[in-house]
Structure formats: C-alpha cells, structure tokens
Image (cartoon, rainbow, N blue to C red):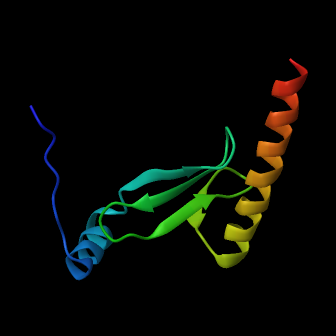
Amino acid sequence: MEPTTIKTNFVFGKMLCKLFRHNYLQSKKITDHVHEYQCSCCGKRATVDIKGNIVDLTPQLQEINDTLSKVYKKRRAVTLRAS
C-alpha cells in the first residue's frame, strides 16, 4: 500500500500549523545530536538549540550549523583515516 500525502498550499498549511502545531521532519543532519527540521505543511525551518529544544532557524543559527557541520566532517575524516 502506498503512503498518502496531503498536498496543501502555503496559506492552508500555515492555518493547519496554527491549529495543530508544526509537523517537523528532519531535513539535514549536522552531527549525531544536532539536526535541522522543516515543517511538511508550511515549510518553516527549525533547529536544535544548546538545551535541546527545537527553535526557529535564524541566519545566525544557520551559520553556526554550517560551521559545526564542516568541523564535524573534518574530524570524522581524520578519525576514519586513523582507524
């Protein structure tokens, strides 16, 4: 059986999110503990803050996530070569 998806336009999606909260799906893995999320209804983007709470993705947090991702990838590459 194929999964069904609800196609919504942007305005209707925003109304659904206001009534029922956002339906965040993981869109990007930064590290093992930090991820970026995107709402499947309205497209709003979010990330995890220092305390582990989901917060809106600001340009500053986007820059932090990009830098953290680069450092994490370099560290993993060095660890894999050493093994």
The tally of labels here is 0
| Looking at the image, residue 44 lies above or below residue 82 | below
Where residue 13 sits: x, y (%)?
25, 72
Q: Is residue 72 left or right of residue 49?
A: right
Residue 46 is situated, as x and y percent measured from the top left of the image, at 54, 64
Q: Residue 10: x percent and y percent? A: 26, 78
Residue reaching furthest left?
1
In this rendering, the answer to whether 77 lies above or below 21 is above
Q: Report the residue at 86% width, 28% height from top.
A: 79
Please indicate whether residue 2 sits to the left or right of residue 29 in the image.
Answer: left
Q: Position of residue 74 (x, y in %)?
A: 83, 44
User: Residue 39 lies in what quarter of the image?
Assistant: bottom left
In the rendered image, the residue lying farthest to the front is: 81
Q: Quadrant of residue 50?
A: bottom right
- Residue found at the far bottom of this picture: 11
User: In the rendered image, which quarter contains the N terminus?
Assistant: top left
39, 71: nearer the viewer: 71
83 lies above or below 55: above
Q: Name which residue lies at 85% across and 39% down.
A: 75
Residue 22: which quarter of the image?
bottom left
Q: Give left or right: position of 59 versus 27.
A: right
Residue at 73% over, 69% down: 63
Q: Work out which quarter of the rendered image holds the C terminus and state it.
A: top right
For the point 15% across and 58% down, the residue is 6
